[in-house]
Image (tube, grey):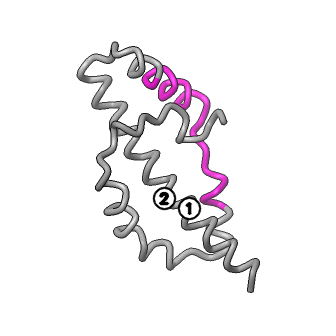
Amino acid sequence: MAGDWGVGYNPGMESAKAMPVLDRLLEPLGDCLTPESARRILALRADATLQARVDELAERCRAGSLSPEEEAEYRSDVSYGTFIAILKSKARQLLAASSGS
């Protein structure tokens, strides 16, 4: 799963309320997707350097050894990953609906 934003995600870092709010905020964007844009969203991957950094921060987070600056960086990474995961979910839904039509 290298290069995929979900690697190292710690569910405890996002509040239980944040994801549904973000999902609702992104609903209009999901409505604008075409099959081509959905496929392009599903192809999004972090580059090797970024993924290595996220993996390193995730490992250190699990070990409880992040500095305050690293924790802030990792929280941002998790937020971005959540955003991308929701977009990918909307892309999958669109492609599933369009293939069933």
Q: Which secondary structure type mostly characterizes the magenta part of the structure?
A: helix
Query: Tag on residue 86?
Result: 2
Residue receiving disc 1: 89
The residue under the point 61% across, 70% down is 93
Please say whether residue 9 is one of the residues in the magenta stretch: no
What is the x, y in percent for residue 16? 32, 50
Which image quarter holds the C terminus? bottom right
The image position of residue 23, as x and y in percent, is 40, 64
C-alpha distance separating marks 2 and 1: 5 Å
Residue furthest out toward the bottom: 101
Q: Are marks 2 and 1 in contact (CB under 8 Å)?
A: yes
Q: Residue at x 57, y 59 (%)?
A: 88
Q: Is residue 44 magenta?
A: yes
Tag 1 secondary structure: helix
Q: Which span is picked out in magenta?
A: 40-58
Q: Position of residue 49 (x, y in %)?
A: 56, 27
Number of marks in the image? 2
Q: Is 11 placed left or right of 43 in the picture?
A: left
* Apparent side of residue 28 relative to residue 87 in the rendered image (left or right): left
